Image: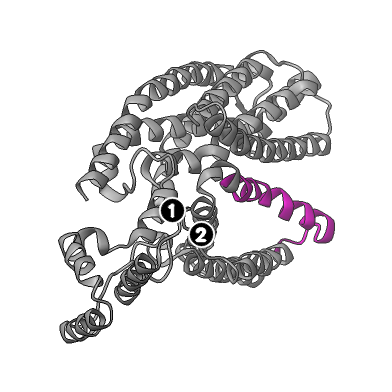
Amino acid sequence: MVDKKGPRVGSTVGCLAMGLGYYALHKTYTNGPGSVPLPLICLFTFVAGAGGSSGFGGAIKTAAMNFPKNRGTATAFPVAAFGLSAFFFSLISSLALPNNTAGFLLFLSIGTFLMIAIPAFFMRILPHSAKYSALLSEADNRAEEHKRSRHRRRDTSTEPGTRDQSVSGPSSSEVSLLNETTRAEMPELSKLDTEDSSHAAVDTSGDEDDSHSADDAHGSVYADLRGWALLRVIEFYQLFIIIGVLTGIGLMTINNIGNNAQALWSHWDENTPAEVIHQRQSMHVSIISIASFTGRLCSGIGSDIIVERLHMSRIWCFVLSSLLFCIAQVCGLTLESPNFLFVLSTISGLGYGFLFGVGPSITADTFGPHGLSQNWGTMTLSPIIFANIYNLMYGRIYDHHSNIRPSGHRECLDGLLCYKDAYWVTFFSSIASIILCLWTIRHGRPAKQRGRKSDADERHLA
């Protein structure tokens, strides 16, 4: 929807979906248990989540299209804000709405609606400025103006960067009348019209549109590849697996950092109050959120430096993310004191941030920016597969070392042994991801050369 209709439409739908979804959850909670069937509650949650994805997709597409030469930095800011939003809302809720779940859901409904609706009014993809060209003589200037007027009559596109950029033209009678009138007034244009008719394929889009397309696809391996066509190129499988594996590694720690803290504190001091453990769990969640925000900004800005100044691939940021995750897994394997668990939280948050901060720009660099929303949405399906694998593995290992208390709750008092085996698996997975990233960079050089050669051949034939 964002790629076809533009980011403003996607953001508008997103703010409405999030506002309605969270408000429905607020009413459901207020009315009490049994007031709404479980399938409807799932539907409300789905609507709110889909709205967040739609609004996020609109912001990413706008940033990537409007700043093609600084795509990493431009997309890093909305990606970083997206990662920090949970910390922002939870902090305000803890200060203004403590122990008020109904009020928090209402706050989410109003807050998310306004935070997307207000910026959506100003969002649009701007056409890029025309490149420098030499001054024309008077006759050439009149000829060029005549040529552009014909392009303006044929071009009815609504917004740059959208897929529906249809081209229509005047009727045959209007064309004949225009040609006769023009030739009578400016005989020197007869030769120009003859040349234009022999290059109709080029003139359909216009010189300015060609320059826009070239700028939009700045540095991309493929000018515009999306949908089922992704399945025919190896770059899709490379990025899909890398993002999936690294996301799964990161989410295993992010989703279970509370269990890590519980296991370590219970083994370190069995008399530790439950309130202290809960405070430490919340602290680790905040550390991960802030570290992820920092990593997203650094990777986005750093990737532009890597590309523009060092003339290297952005995927080196994936290599750095893999290295950070590798170090984090070593911490997960060795840290026995709960007082130093923040090291694991910090490094995991940074690695996760470096992954997602540069992910959209790498997707645009590989498959072109015009289908970025669809392609990035496809890429983010990989965490559904790999994150579930790693989380289920962690849960099975943790449960194996746990005992069932009389209350029915599971409790593990073995400390590091409660989850150590899970971090061995993610450690070797992070090493495998480093190897895959390096192979992708090595493979990407000839692929990019082939893509540039193909684009050059198309321009030559045109």
264 and 188: which is toward the camera: 188
Instruction: Kindly give the residue lying farthest to the top in the view shown.
Output: 334
Disc 2 element: helix
291 and 151: which is toward the camera: 151
Return the x and y of residue 54 as percentages of the image width and height. 49, 60
Above or below: residue 245 compared with residue 454 = above
Which residue in the structure is indicated by mark 2?
A: 58
Residue 64, labelled with which disc?
none
Above or below: residue 86 compared with residue 399 = below
277 and 343: which is toward the camera: 343
Above or below: residue 308 compared with residue 379 = above
Q: CA distance from mark 1 to mark 2?
A: 7 Å
Return the x and y of residue 172 as percentages of the image width and height. 16, 82
Q: Residue at x 54, y 38 (%)?
A: 358
Q: Main secondary structure of the magenta part?
A: helix
Q: Residue at x 21, y 80 (%)?
A: 179
Above or below: residue 206 compared with residue 334 = below
Q: Residues within 10 Å of mark 1 (few under 14, many from 20)?
A: many
**Can residue 404 be seen from the camera position used here?**
no
- Tell me: 100 left or right of 461: right
Range of magenta residues? 75-101
Amino acid on which disc 2 is placed: Gly
Task: Tell me, yes or no, whether the two marked residues, 1 and 2, touch with CB atoms within 8 Å.
Answer: yes
Quadrant assignment for the N terminus: bottom left
Which residue in the structure is indicated by mark 1?
A: 373
Amino acid on which disc 1 is placed: Ser
Disc 1 element: helix
**Can residue 340 be seen from the camera position used here?**
yes
Q: Residue at x 47, y 20 (%)?
A: 429
Q: Quadrant location of residue 173?
A: bottom left
Q: Earlier in the sequence, mark 1 or mark 2?
A: 2
- Tell me: 362 left or right of 86: left
